[in-house]
Image (cartoon, helix red, strand yellow):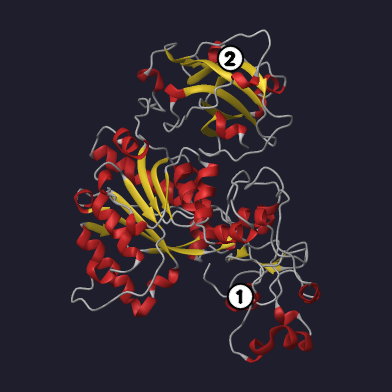
Amino acid sequence: MGTSLATAQKWGENGVYPYHKNEKGKEGFYMEELTDVEPVKKMLDTNWEEEFHVAPLRDYTSVELFAGAGGLALGMHMAGFRHVLLNEMDAMACETLRRNHPEWNVLEGDIHKVDFTPLRDKVDFLSGGFPCQAFSYAGKKGGLNDTRGTLFFELARAVKEIHPKVFMGENVKGLLSHDEGKTLEVIRNAIKELGYTLVEPRVLKAIMYQVPQKRERLILVAIRNDIYERGIRFKWPDPYRRVMTLRDAFFCGELFDKDVPESEGQLYPAKKARVMEMVPEGGDWRDLPVDVQKEYMGGSFHLGGGKTGMARRLSMDEPSLTLTCAPAQKQTERCHPTETRPLTVREYARIQTFPDNWEFEGNITDQYKQIGNAVPVNLAFAIGRSLIRLFNEIEALYPEESKIEEADKIAHGMLPPTLFEIDMFNMHEQYPKNANIVSNPYIRRKRFDISALDDSKNVLVSLVPDKYIVPYNNQRAKAYFTGKKFPSTVKLNKLYYFMPYLKGKGIRDLYQIEVARVGTKHEFTKAADEDDFRLVFEIKFVTQLFDDYKPIKLMIWRTYTDTNLRAILAM
């Protein structure tokens, strides 16, 4: 959190805060006794749970540049943004995006050759993690012209051509001090030239946002001047209530509903393995015998600095160090806490909070690189929810019909069906009781043929509360009630199939939604309130899609996933 280990140890030694020992004999502090430490105070007073349920008033469209393997894109998608275009140059990263979201419009190639003008005034939000190269300071104003030849200039060009309401850039925290602050000043002036107001940039620590990793990213959010002048302001996300560790990443718990699956990973050469075997959990080269230090480190042994990345073994009860593009680089070692080996691909992905069903294309080197370069998904999700809240405020000032249709027409050459939106607090006023929102004919067959399934149809995956789980266990469920809040991002008019998600297990059975309507739980549970309005799905069991349950990560509020059957069958 920005406090050095030496300072924290002095707190304990001098009694500034009381020291405590855990069951392993390790000393530390209780969060509740650190209320004077600002980051801890923010975690204790957080509005995380309230912010977690922020939902878009309508589909907000977005374009993402420098998309990589999708960490930022996935987090924004989970928050409620609908991607119209993603641009990325790396071929394997593009294949990763297409594999996991076939419906995304992934444009592979050099951004310099992309014309964004057809999307002008048709997209709400633009984002991108632009690489930071050297800037020119030849100009008198240090503005947009002085960014030419850099990839920030291409981000700025996209902003100029698309004219979104808000745009966001993300970068390493070193950009703040790059070239004594001149680089950031040029970026500030360029944003001003574009007609946007830059929110004061902030370095966000991933550990504060349910990410088990000490990663920091500089976030730049800019709001179009005509909107900013109306008093619209961006509020940064509140932190999670505690710091996640590698134990949270690798085992069933708050972050994941099962232990980390096995996957391929690099191996140490025999000589290096013998050295790493001597390093204790949480240790590094300083824990080795001096003769081994000198042999292993070579010339680095006599250089200054802590060199704490060398021969580094991670600790299970701490967050990971920032992941790099390879887990076994000598200067930035990332050894497993309790096994003498580098982290595997899936362990890498979990530390970046990618769901287990997010698959990476390419060879093992490609996969490590894609994961190591990504924005942590949960960090992006937290920022995305804050941006959705911002867009909801903008929508209240500028109510307008969504321009998704026009953007999609450009991206895909076709128009999607009209989007049904739900007023989550007053559904019964928008849709009269028992009025059908969806009515699908159920096709009865004497002998079921799985080839008859239409894999283009939408599937809604929904969490089933434990107390209602029995009929889903035996494949006899007839109805599903949504919670009191239901996300407007779910396209009700496209609902066709339904899959119950059983906590701790995952998905297995496919149902068809015969009718979706507004109703009450009182219809089926007489003790329930007659005015407790919910969405009711009348469902019919179709087939068991998988031999056993398949765990997936639910994407919307960790309760729902709106996808299609093709994506489900590809799991």
Disc nearer the start of the sequence (1/2)? 1
Q: Is residue 204 left or right of residue 149?
A: right
Asked if disc 1 and disc 2 are in contact, CB closer than 8 Å, the reply is: no
User: Crowding near pointer 1: few (<14 within 10 Å), some, many (20+)?
Assistant: few
Nearer the observer: mark 1 or 2; the answer is: 1
The residue tagged 1 is 5
Pinpoint residue 366: horizontal percent, then vertical percent: 59, 59
Q: Is residue 47 visible?
A: no
Q: In terms of image quadrants, where is residue 345?
A: bottom right
- Identify the secondary structure beneath mark 1: helix
The residue tagged 2 is 527
User: Crowding near pointer 2: few (<14 within 10 Å), some, many (20+)?
Assistant: few
Amino acid type, residue under disc 1 in the picture = Leu
In the image shown, does 414 or 35 lie closer to the viewer?
414
Query: Which residue appears at 40% of the width and 18% of the height?
Result: 428
Query: Which residue appears at 75% of the width and 80% of the height?
Result: 287
In the image shown, does 529 or 338 lie closer to the viewer?
338
